[in-house]
Image: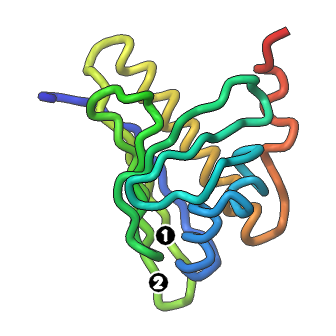
């Protein structure tokens, strides 16, 4: 897609890549900072269902390519073409990990711009919640989005 937009966010987490990786692919890790539940871990080619605490709906998530401690990609778009989420984990000499998230692609129009901004905001929140959980044992997401619940 020419001139396509992507959502991006990154953060450095003071934990080894293996711990960060496990916190992203395993339901018991993700339920501490992001989702309420999952029907299983993210594994190559498998589809799981995520449930978020703020919403009644569940979301199918299809893992595309997983490289232990280095890379995670999945589609949670419901099959929309070109909407792959990629998470790159970079180990640093001090034992910390840089996590970079890229999601795309969105059309370069008003709707696509809004979507790219919203997704970038969402991934920045995801990374902050991941960092708080792994470094401090805090669930930043708890109660943070209650205002979004349908009445």
Quadrant of the rendering where the N terminus is positioned? top left
User: Can you tell which mark lies on residue 66?
Assistant: none
The residue singled out by tag 1 in the image is 98
22 relative to 141 in the view: left or right: left
Residue in view at x 38 percent, y 71 percent: 67
Residue 90 drawn above or below residue 125: below
Residue at point 47% right, 76% down? 69
Can you give x and y, in whole percent of width and height, for residue 71 in the image? 39, 66
Tell me: 34 left or right of 60: right
Please tell me how crowded label 2 is: few (under 14), some (14-19), or many (20+) other residues with Cα within 10 Å.
some
Give the residue drawn at x 35%, y 59%: 65
Task: Return the residue at label 2.
Answer: 92
| Quadrant of the rendered image containing residue 130 | bottom right
Q: In this picture, is 3 found above or below 10?
A: above
Residue appearing at x 27%, y 21% in the figure: 107
Total labels drawn: 2
The residue carrying pointer 1 sits among few (fewer than 14), some (14 to 19) or many (20 or more) residues within 10 Å by Cα, namely: some
Earlier in the chain: of badge 1 and badge 2, it is 2
Residue 148, percent across and down?
76, 20
From the viewer's side, name the closer residue of 8 and 48: 48
Quadrant, the C terminus: top right
């Amino acid at each position: 897609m020419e001139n396509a937009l992507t959502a991006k966010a990154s953060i450095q987490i003071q934990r080894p890549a293996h711990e960060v990786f496990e916190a992203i692919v395993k339901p018991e890790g993700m339920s501490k900072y992001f989702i309420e539940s999952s029907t299983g871990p993210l594994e190559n080619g498998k589809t799981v269902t995520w449930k978020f605490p703020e919403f009644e709906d569940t979301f199918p998530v299809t893992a595309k390519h997983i490289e232990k401690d280095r890379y995670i990609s999945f589609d949670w778009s419901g099959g929309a073409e070109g909407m792959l989420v990629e998470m790159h984990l970079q180990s640093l000499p001090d034992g910390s990990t840089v996590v970079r998230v890229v999601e795309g692609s969105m059309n370069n129009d008003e709707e696509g711009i809004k979507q790219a901004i919203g997704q970038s905001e969402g991934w920045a929140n995801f990374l902050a919640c991941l960092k708080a959980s792994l470094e401090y044992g805090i669930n930043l997401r708890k109660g943070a989005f209650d205002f979004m619940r349908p009445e």
